[in-house]
């Protein structure tokens, strides 16, 4: 997909992000360092407020970092002006899937109109764009008959597939997914995760953000664990799940329901929490 | 959009009336059977074959005055609305996008305009720019623009921070694209409603300024002017205000109706409405066939 197979599609080094608050400021990300290779799927997990979404928004240029460096598809975007960001976005190398598919689709635009939008913004011809949209609908297993529907007339699972299809129409090198499955019921969640695996196999790099280790572990090649704005552990998915090193990761792994006795689980988690806050 | 509006009965009525008003504005002065400015000794006369709507206190033919005055009245109302639209809606939408500085300045300007006494402002503008109908309409347009500013800003704010606009931004959309593709359909209905109100206010204000000597100068006829002079002689001709009132009311009502039709056909609700109508139509057709 990318020109140079060794060049990372995303390279984030020492990223610091502050939010201004009424009283002082909030340190949302501290020296975050992360890279995503072409075709690689990296999961970012952490609890609410750990800085997951901030990381995504900084990479997308929606939040300005106060320190650090972001390189997207070989282009250093750290100091980009609004105009240069727009030029980069129009190339369609970077796309984003929102947490809430209903609110991320314009209620007045049909599925086809929503899907064709990124292509029209990129300046593609209408006929060519419509052709690509049809192909993408098939790729996410949506019936072409749905393309004239409004988002309100679709089920939750269908909406999420439309949102994914919109992110894919421009053939991006990297797709950032912010909690893509947390708004879905368990049957749709499984189908969505299957879809993500297909994407990964097709060579699109994914940055999969979630609070749920379970849904990330099955898809990601590597996992980064965010805790209070810091990336506390990065490693292959398997070793994060089987041999977590940081106490917070161990707590996360320990929080997954097991078949052992609940009392033993709880005692273990309490011990880890104490270690974490010490 | 127009085709969808014409699909509604209310839309057809509104467009029909407004078209008639537009024709009046263009051809009205030519249709006047008598000189609208020529007085006669036959004052405050009842309707007759010679004066279909009677005469006013100077013996001028009321029908001719209404017909001759339609151009000024309609033009005045249109000018007021356009002015308010340009001065109110455009900054209202841009105040969300052009950064904090612009936002602050426009908000304070709107506050100032709301606090400004209308008559003082009107007199000041006339003193500065001289007297004339465009100046008067400019004044009125500026005075009502805060309404448009607030309405369009509120509607824009509610859409601008939504994830689907952010999704467009992430795809590299410009502000113009976002306004055209996402904002317009949501901002238009509330603006259309404010617009219909303002058009109504415009008719009345055109003539109410006359007594200050601003805008329309007395012998020139307007709908509002005819109404005002009729109201002074209610004890002689109690039915007289009816004719100008019907003209003004019909126009304002058509504007309101059009605004409702715009709201009904645009946006999500509009689609749902049309959708039901289509289905109902199909069901009815199926019923006929069976």
Image (cartoon, coloured by chain):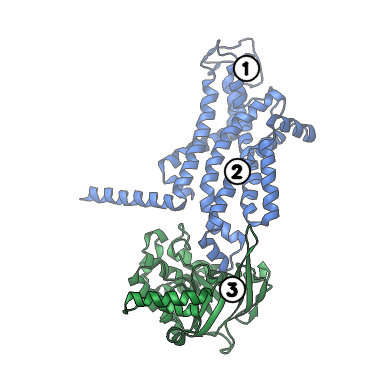
Chain colours: A green, B blue
Instruction: Name the chain letter of the residue that bears numbered label 2.
Output: B
| In contact (CB < 8 Å): disc 1 and disc 3 | no
Secondary structure of the residue carrying tag 3 is helix
Q: Residue at x 47, y 64 (%)?
A: A113
Nearer to us of marks 2 and 3 is 3
Q: Is residue B98 left or right of residue A96?
A: right
> How crowded is the residue under tag 1: few (<14 C-alpha within 10 Å), some, or many (20+)?
many
Residue A152 x %, y % = 40, 59
| In contact (CB < 8 Å): disc 2 and disc 3 | no
Real-space Cα separation, disc 2 to disc 3, in angstroms: 37 Å
Residue A214 makes an appearance in the image: no
Looking at the rendered structure, whether the residues under marks 1 and 2 are on a common chain is answered as yes
> How crowded is the residue under tag 2: few (<14 C-alpha within 10 Å), some, or many (20+)?
many
Query: What residue is shown with label 1?
Result: B60
Real-space Cα separation, disc 1 to disc 2, in angstroms: 39 Å
Secondary structure of the residue carrying tag 1 is loop
Real-space Cα separation, disc 1 to disc 3, in angstroms: 75 Å
Query: What residue is shown with label 2?
Result: B148
> Looking at the image, which residue sits at the far bottom?
A6
Q: Residue at x 48, y 50 (%)?
A: B1
Residue B137 x %, y % = 67, 35
Query: What residue is shown with label 3?
Result: A59
Judge by depth and name the residue closer to the eye, A10 or B201. Answer: A10
Q: Is residue A60 left or right of residue B16?
A: right
**In the image, residue A78 above or below residue B41:** below
Secondary structure of the residue carrying tag 2 is helix
Q: Which quadrant holds residue B191?
A: top right
């Amino acid at each position: 997909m990318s020109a140079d197979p060794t060049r990372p599609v995303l390279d984030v080094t020492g990223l610091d992000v502050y939010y201004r608050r009424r009283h002082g400021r909030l340190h949302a990300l501290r020296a975050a360092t992360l890279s995503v290779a072409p075709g690689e799927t990296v999961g970012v997990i952490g609890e609410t407020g750990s800085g997951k979404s901030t990381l995504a928004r900084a990479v997308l240029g929606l939040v300005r970092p106060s320190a650090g460096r972001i390189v997207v598809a070989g282009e250093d975007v750290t100091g980009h002006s609004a105009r240069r960001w727009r030029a980069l976005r129009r190339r369609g190398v970077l796309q984003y899937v929102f947490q809430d598919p209903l609110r991320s689709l314009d209620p007045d635009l049909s599925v086809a109109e929503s899907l064709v939008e990124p292509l029209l913004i990129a300046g593609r011809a209408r006929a060519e764009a419509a052709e690509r949209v049809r192909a993408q609908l098939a790729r996410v297993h949506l019936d072409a008959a749905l393309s004239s529907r409004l988002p309100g007339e679709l089920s939750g699972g269908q909406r999420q597939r439309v949102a994914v299809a919109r992110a894919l129409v421009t053939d991006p090198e990297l797709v950032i997914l912010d909690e893509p499955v947390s708004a879905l019921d368990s049957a749709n969640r499984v189908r969505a995760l299957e879809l993500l695996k297909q994407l990964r196999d097709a060579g699109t790099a994914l940055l999969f953000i979630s609070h749920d280790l379970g849904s990330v572990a099955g898809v990601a090649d590597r996992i980064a664990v965010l805790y209070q704005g810091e990336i506390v552990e990065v490693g292959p998915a398997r070793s994060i799940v089987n041999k977590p090193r940081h106490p917070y990761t161990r707590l996360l792994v320990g929080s997954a329901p097991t078949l052992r006795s609940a009392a033993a689980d709880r005692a273990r988690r309490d011990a880890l929490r104490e270690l974490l806050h010490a | 959009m127009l085709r969808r509006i014409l699909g509604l009965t209310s839309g057809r009525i509104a467009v029909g009336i407004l078209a008639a008003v537009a024709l009046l504005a263009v051809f009205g002065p030519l249709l006047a059977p008598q000189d609208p400015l020529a007085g006669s000794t036959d004052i405050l006369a009842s309707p007759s074959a010679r004066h279909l709507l009677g005469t006013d206190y100077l013996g001028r033919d009321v029908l001719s005055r209404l017909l001759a005055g339609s151009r000024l009245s309609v033009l005045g109302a249109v000018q007021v609305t356009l002015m308010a639209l340009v001065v109110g809606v455009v900054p209202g939408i841009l105040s969300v996008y052009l950064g904090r500085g612009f936002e602050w300045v426009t908000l304070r300007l709107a506050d100032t305009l709301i606090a400004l006494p209308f008559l003082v402002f009107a007199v000041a503008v006339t003193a500065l720019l001289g007297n004339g109908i465009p100046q008067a309409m400019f004044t009125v347009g500026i005075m009502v623009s805060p309404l448009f500013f607030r309405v369009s800003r509120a509607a824009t704010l509610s859409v601008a921070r939504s994830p689907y606009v952010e999704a467009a931004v992430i795809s590299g959309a410009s502000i113009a694209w976002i306004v055209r593709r996402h904002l317009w359909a949501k901002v238009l209905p509330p603006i259309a409603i404010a617009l219909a109100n303002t058009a109504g206010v415009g008719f009345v204000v055109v003539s109410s300024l006359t007594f200050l000597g601003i805008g329309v100068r007395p012998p020139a006829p307007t709908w509002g002017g005819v109404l005002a002079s009729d109201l002074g002689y209610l004890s002689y001709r109690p039915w007289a205000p009816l004719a100008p009132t019907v003209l003004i009311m019909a126009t304002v009502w058509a504007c309101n109706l059009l605004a409702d039709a715009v709201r009904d056909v645009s946006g999500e609700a509009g689609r749902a409405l049309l959708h039901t109508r289509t289905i109902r139509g199909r069901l009815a057709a199926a019923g006929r066939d069976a």
